[in-house]
Image (spheres, rainbow, N blue to C red):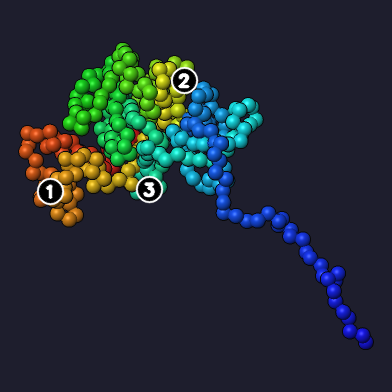
Amino acid sequence: MSKRHWDESDIRIRPNRKGTRPRTKDRPSHDDAEFGMVVTKDRGRWGVVLDGREEPIVTMRAREMGRTAVEVGDRVGLVGDTSGREGTLARIVKLEERTSVLRRTADDTDPFERIVVANADQLLIVTAVADPPPRSGFVERALIAAFVGNVHPILCLTKSDLTDPAPFAAEFEDLDVTVVYAGVDDPVDELRDMLEGKVTALVGHSGVGKSTLVNRLVPDAHRETGVVSGVGKGRHTSTQSVALRLPGGGWIVDTPGIRSFGLAHVDADTVIGVFEDLAAAVENCPRGCTHLGPPADPECALDNFDPDTASARRRDAVRKLLEALSSNNEWEM
């Protein structure tokens, strides 16, 4: 039997079924991306108003973004078809660094933080002074979220035609919180001036008149309004956060009515750190001090302030916030 000789014609090269495109970790720079603000978020689609435009366009998150969270208020870069024509879908490929983040958790045991609004300048905490009665615990928790999230808080009291709002407003005067009244007989010119040119998030329990207030500030918003039920809980009239352009410039972000404001991601030292005078004082506190004062903390350095000073009054007000942070008694509806 003769021995077979092999040459190159006998060799078969199998085609690369996965294609010949080389794998790379490089990603396109998207230098041509157009930027705008996220104004709606709903089931994998985001509405974005591009800079210099009036109407939002529908977008999706690009695959290269992975599971990067994109929230209402975010500044994002888009590529693809940004014409906004019906049936088009641009892609979110960039997320600018946030200037502020307003967060909450479902409750104080939930480790999962939910971003309420990104890049807000202000937080408008809307609460009624009657029907339903005000809950100071909710307001205190919302204030904590604003302070630690680098957002300026404003307390807006509605239904002031039903009772005098001054006693409730006085509970927060030592925190230097701006308070405005927005009852049906109160003009909203002062409030409108505060919001102009800024991004302002609204939070509040259902039934406190939040949607009614939005409709007064943005006449063409047509936000659904509801009445308070017989058991004292409002009907949820907003189901998704949406940013609405104010007639005089700026944005107001109407968030869904919520019944709880969990702060599992916040501790006492974080709250104290917002106030320079208090933060400097607690450096002299013993290890493990909760800063709540006697009898829990008989050696708390916050007790060394002269009782007639603004720092002492601020300490007392902040301790109320810390009590709200450690208690679940008053913050749910």
In this rendered view, identify the residue nearer to me: 51 or 70: 51
> Can you tell which mark lies on residue 85?
none
Q: Could you say where residue 17 lies in the image, as x and y percent from the top left? A: 74, 58
In the depicted structure, whether residue 232 falls above or below residue 108? above
Q: Reading the chain from its start, which is encountered first: label 3 or label 1? A: 3
Secondary structure state at the residue bearing disc 3: loop
Q: Could you say where residue 58 lies in the image, as x and y percent from the top left? A: 57, 31
What's the residue at 17%, 31% (across, down)?
Answer: 174
In this rendered view, identify the residue nearer to me: 147 or 276: 276
Give left or right: position of 202 versus 267: right
Distance in Å between CA atoms under marks 2 and 1: 50 Å
Distance in Å between CA atoms under marks 3 and 1: 29 Å
What's the residue at 89%, 84% (across, down)?
Answer: 3
Give left or right: position of 255 versus 82: left
- What's the residue type where badge 2 is placed? Ala
Q: Reading the chain from its start, which is encountered first: label 2 or label 1? A: 2
What's the residue at 63%, 26% (across, down)?
Answer: 85
Residue position marked by numbered label 2 in the rendering: 221
Residue position marked by numbered label 1 in the rendering: 300
In this rendered view, identify the residue nearer to me: 127 or 79: 79
Secondary structure state at the residue bearing disc 1: loop
> Can you tell which mark lies on residue 110?
3
Give left or right: position of 117 versus 41: left
